[in-house]
Image: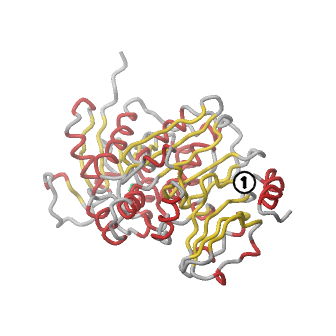
């Protein structure tokens, strides 16, 4: 029988995830993995671990030949990239939870893995406890992967649940998410969608072989969503969720974005509450599959880090099959979206930019419309994020170019115009 490799770990970071990992590892002696050193920034902070474990010198880990695994769970994306690159170049396997760093440095990290042949695993960087990266990597052939829709940020899902189901105000809900260790240290990253788009950039690579940068993907967070939007949703038996979506269009290119979206009550993602995440994958022949689990928090995130560490015992590596072994897909900006927009005044809304508007309510103080526009009327434009305007995608928002003429005609007929 092949014996598993002994893993000697150097850990960077002892915050929510780092400390969680330390505790989880102590309860998993069968793993044959031990932490030799932990590198931290502030030595004076009180920590629940022997003082001899800690250092402030990164070389104590990066230059120690006995340490064969570097686990990096720090907050600073630039420092994290330096640590990860040096560790890989020094012949160490690396496990990371730094989604921002990974999303912003995908091309360099891919090259570093090819150059060094080392394992670089980061399951915890997207959807924390849900093993979505390894599933996309190993199980789904990209020819068969039609679409993925997911809730990838625990804090915003927690805030939306607390606001609209438990009637908490936004600030109290955010504070609670911070106290429970779900939010980023700069919670703007959660609330305004940056964390979700970082995770989506990572997942698009494993799903479709797309190597992109978060800047290339249309996104926003929940900062504009209003109570009046939740009331409209309730009337129509919908929820509001921050949804990351990717769909293969008829021409084989992929539409991808992260935006608030209405979700029907009988859809799996509607059951995803609080800090939980969920992923719905639609693939040829299998139809829909649903992954569900905790998307934030100390132990759920540490559990994914632990699983990566365990995989290193048999030298597991991502093969990036969709990128290297298949024809990778391209992102496209050429499609239409059906949106709900609520606003205070018509003058803020570029009505002429819509292909058609099929519902509008202009009497109340808070007005809204439902209409269809081209992707380019949102990307690079700010009207839908300014002047207290709120945009939410409808339940089935993507319209392929090939369908637009047919649907426009039908809609105008229904409105009695054509
Ligand atoms: N702030 C992140 C979230 C933590 O709320 O999802 C997990 O990545």
In this view, 264 is above or below 375: above
Residue 273: image location, x then y, percent? 39, 51
Residue at the extreme top of the image, as rendered: 1
Q: Badge 1: few (under 14), some or many (20 or more) residues near its Cα, within 10 Å?
A: some
Residue located at (75% from left, 58% from top) = 334
337 lies left or right of 84 = right
* Image location (x, y in percent) of residue 261: 55, 58
- Secondary element at tag 1: strand
Residue shown at 56%/82% (left/top)? 387
Q: Which residue is mark 1?
A: 399
Asked whether, in this view, residue 54 is left or right of residue 191, the answer is left
Position of residue 238 measured from the top left corner of the image (x, y, whole percent) = 51, 55
Q: Position of residue 335 (x, y in %)?
A: 74, 57
Ligand 1 is found in the corner quadrant, namely bottom left
**Residue lying farthest right?**
418
Q: In this picture, is 144 found above or below 275?
A: above
Image side of residue 380 versus residue 47, left or right = right
Q: Residue at x 61, y 65 (%)?
A: 340
Query: In the rendered image, which quarter is residue 9 located in?
Result: top left
Residue 381 vertical placement versus 289 (above, below): below
Q: Is residue 261 above or below residue 284?
A: below
Residue placed most toward the observer, 195 or 355 = 355
């Amino acid at each position: 029988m092949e014996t598993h490799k002994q893993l000697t770990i150097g850990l960077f970071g002892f915050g929510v995830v780092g400390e969680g990992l330390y505790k989880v590892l102590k309860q998993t002696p069968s793993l044959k993995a031990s932490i030799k050193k932990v590198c931290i920034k502030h030595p004076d902070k009180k920590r629940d671990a022997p003082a001899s474990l800690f250092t402030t010198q990164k070389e104590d880990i990066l230059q120690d030949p006995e340490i064969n695994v570097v686990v990096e769970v720090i907050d600073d994306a630039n420092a994290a990239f330096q640590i990860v690159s040096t560790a890989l170049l020094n012949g160490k396997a690396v496990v990371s939870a730094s989604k921002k760093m990974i999303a912003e440095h995908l091309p360099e990290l891919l090259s570093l893995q090819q150059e060094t042949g080392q394992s670089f695993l980061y399951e915890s960087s997207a959807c924390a406890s849900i093993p979505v990266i390894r599933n996309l990597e190993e199980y789904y052939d990209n020819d068969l992967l039609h679409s993925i829709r997911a809730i990838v940020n625990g804090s915003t899902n927690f805030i939306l649940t607390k606001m609209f189901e438990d009637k908490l105000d936004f600030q109290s809900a955010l504070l609670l998410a911070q106290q429970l260790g779900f939010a980023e240290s700069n919670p703007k990253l959660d609330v305004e969608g940056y964390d979700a788009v970082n995770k989506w950039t990572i997942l698009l690579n494993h799903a479709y072989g797309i190597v992109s940068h978060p800047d290339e993907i249309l996104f926003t967070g929940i900062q504009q969503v209003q109570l009046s939007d939740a009331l409209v949703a309730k009337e129509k038996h919908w929820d509001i969720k921050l949804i990351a979506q990717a769909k293969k269009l008829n021409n084989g290119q992929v539409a991808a974005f992260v935006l608030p979206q209405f979700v029907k009550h009988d859809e799996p993602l509607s059951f995803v509450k609080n800090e939980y995440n969920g992923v719905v994958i639609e693939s040829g022949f299998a139809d829909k599959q649903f992954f569900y689990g905790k998307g934030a928090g100390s132990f759920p995130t540490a559990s994914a880090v632990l699983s990566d560490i365990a995989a290193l015992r048999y030298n597991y590596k991502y093969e990036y099959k969709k990128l290297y072994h298949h024809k990778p897909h391209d992102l496209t900006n050429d499609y239409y979206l059906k949106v709900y927009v609520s606003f205070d005044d018509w003058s803020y809304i570029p009505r002429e930019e819509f292909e058609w508007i099929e519902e509008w309510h202009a009497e109340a103080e808070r007005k809204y419309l439902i209409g269809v526009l081209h992707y380019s009327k949102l990307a690079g434009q700010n009207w839908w994020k300014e002047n207290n305007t709120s945009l939410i995608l409808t339940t089935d928002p993507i319209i392929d170019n090939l369908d637009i003429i047919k649907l426009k005609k039908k809609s105008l007929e229904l409105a009695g115009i054509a």
